[in-house]
Amino acid sequence: MRAGAFTVLCVYLLVVGWLALRPLSVMWVEPHNLEPLATIRADLARGPVEGARTIGAGMLRLAPLGVLLPLLSPRLGGGRFASLVRTVSGGFLLTAALEWSQSLVPSRVADVDTIILSTCGIGVTHLLCYGRLRALLLGGPSAPPARGDETSGGAVDGAPWDSFWDTPPGSPWDTRWCLPGTDAPPGKAGMTAAAPALSSRP
C-alpha cells in the first residue's frame, strides 16, 4: 500500500509540477504577491460566484495530498491530530517549494495565497478522509465492551463485583470461594450452598 501511494504521489506531483512550471506565452505578468489574503480579497471583490470558483480551485489544487501523504506513514501517521499535523506540514512544504519554483519561471507568478489555499485544501481533505482510511486499512478503533457483557470481562448487570461470582470452574480462583470442610462448588451457587454449613457449625 505504501509503495503504491508513493508511486501515485510521485506521478501526481510530476503532473502538477509540469502544469505549474511550464512556460506560458504572455505579453506581461503581474508582480509576485507576498501579501497574505490579498488575492483572496480581490477574488471575492469580483463577486461570490467568481470568488467561490477561484478559491475552490486553489483548495483543490493539491487536495489529494491529504490522502496520499498519510498513506506513506506507518498507521497513517498516528492518531487523527498527529496525522493531521504531519500531513498539513508536509503539504505546506511541498506547496511552498512549488511556489518558489514558479518564481524562477519568467512567465509565472508566485502567490502566497496559493500556499494558504492549497494547505487548507490538504487539511480539509485529511479531516474528511482520515476516518474512512483508518476503517479500511486499520480496522478502526475497537468498540468498547457493552455494559453487562460477561464475555468482555466487564461488569455483569452493571455491578462491578458480580463477575467474581461467576468464576469458571477449574480456574485458580475457584478455591477462595469454597469454605473449608464443605463440598460447595465454586461460583455463586457454591456460596449459597455453603451458607447452611456455616450456620450449622457450633
Image (cartoon, rainbow, N blue to C red):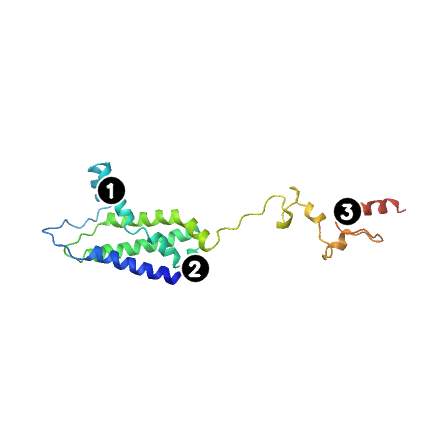
In the displayed structure, 44 sits above or below 201; it is above
Residue that label 2 marks: 74
Q: Is residue 134 left or right of residue 28?
A: right
Q: Residue at x 29, y 47 (%)?
A: 59
Residue pictured at 38% horizontal, 52% vertical: 85
* Residue type pointed to by label 2: Pro
Q: In this image, 147 relative to 85: left or right?
A: right
Q: Position of residue 136 (x, y in %)?
A: 45, 53
Quarter of the N terminus within the rendering: bottom left
Give the numbered dot on residue 189: 3
First reached walking from the N terminus: tag 1 or tag 3: 1
Classed neighbour count for the residue bearing mark 3: other residues with Cα under 10 Å, few (<14), some (14–19), many (≥20): few
Residue to which mark 1 is pinned: 53
Q: Position of residue 17 (x, y in %)?
A: 24, 57
Identify which residue, 167 or 98, lies in the foreground.
167
User: How many numbered discs?
Assistant: 3
Picture quadrant where residue 11 is located: bottom left
Tell me how far mark 1 sits from mark 3, CA to CA: 73 Å
Marks 2 and 1 close (CB-CB < 8 Å): no
Q: Amino acid at mark 1?
A: Arg
Comparing labels 3 and 2, the label whose residue is closer to the camera: 3
Residue 37 visible within the image: no
The answer to whether 178 appears left or right of 132 in the picture is right
